[in-house]
Image (cartoon, rainbow, N blue to C red):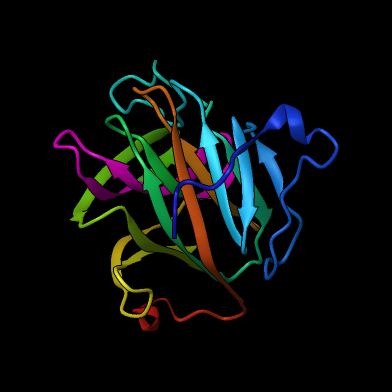
């Protein structure tokens, strides 16, 4: 996997503004368009500009940016979705993420995110009006596998170094009813932009045993 793929600006893609990815249950739609995107051999690259974020400060809620690009599809009631994420980060909090959206105040993201020491770490953010942000553990290199699974109202986040053996990172309930949207996001809250490559997608629908997905 390389992060040197040609990124086509959104202005140049006006004739076909939506990426097409095989294996997903519904068409993709944008929530905040990226600086650019490309698809190369089935891998999706998203690029974002400077100062792009998706967060609600838990102390007071007065910091609530919603500018990070997101590419989402409508997921089934019960499902699992995983992808490999490879991040080109330049500044703290640059990240590539799995995104989960219920409403404007009920959503989550699961990220490979740049840290203060220059490395990358697994970070989970669950937002129920305010964001609950938790850093799990550091990752060697620039890539990892991330997975989200939902059974009824229970939602699990998992991470893996190889896409085969998974660790449970977060268990939660968004407090929403009905189906959620899932997909991809990239952010650069403090920097001048970042890129993330998403590949090796796996989507499964139907009854999910959240504990057996490890």
| Residue 152 appears in the picture as rendered | no
Residue pictured at 43% horizontal, 65% vertical: 147
Question: Which of the 4 image quadrants contains residue 31?
Answer: top right
Q: Is residue 119 magenta?
A: yes
- Where is residue 148? Give x, y as percent: 46, 63
Q: Quadrant of the N terminus?
A: bottom left
Q: Residue 89: image x %, image y %? A: 34, 38
Tell me what residue is drawn at x 39 percent, y 15 percent. Answer: 62
Q: Nearer the viewer, residue 113 or 87?
A: 87
Magenta: main secondary structure: strand
Residue 27: x and y, percent? 76, 56
**Residue under the point 28% across and 23% down:** 59
Judged from this view, the residue extending furthest toward the left is 117
Vertical relation: 151 (above or below) 96? below
Locate residue 74: give its quadrant.
bottom right
> Which residues, given as a range, are shown in magenta?
99-124
């Amino acid at each position: 996997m390389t992060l040197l793929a040609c990124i086509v600006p959104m202005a140049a893609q006006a004739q076909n503004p939506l990426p097409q990815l095989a294996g997903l249950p519904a068409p993709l739609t944008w929530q905040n368009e990226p600086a650019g995107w490309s698809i190369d051999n089935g891998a999706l690259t998203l690029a974002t500009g400077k100062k792009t974020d998706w967060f609600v400060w838990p102390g007071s809620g007065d910091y609530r940016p919603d500018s990070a690009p997101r590419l989402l599809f409508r997921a089934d009631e019960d499902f699992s979705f995983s992808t490999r994420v490879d991040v080109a980060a330049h500044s703290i909090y640059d990240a590539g993420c799995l995104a989960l959206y219920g409403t404007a105040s009920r959503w989550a993201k699961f990220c490979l995110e740049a840290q203060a020491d220059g490395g990358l770490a697994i970070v989970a953010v669950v937002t129920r009006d305010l964001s609950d942000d938790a850093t799990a553990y550091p990752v060697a290199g620039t890539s990892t596998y991330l997975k989200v699974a939902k059974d009824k109202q229970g939602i699990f986040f998992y991470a893996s170094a190889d896409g085969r053996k998974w660790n449970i990172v977060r268990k939660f309930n968004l407090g929403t009813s009905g189906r959620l949207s899932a997909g991809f996001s990239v952010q650069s809250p403090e920097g001048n932009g970042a890129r993330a490559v998403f590949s090796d997608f796996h989507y499964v629908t139907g009854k999910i045993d959240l504990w057996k997905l490890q």
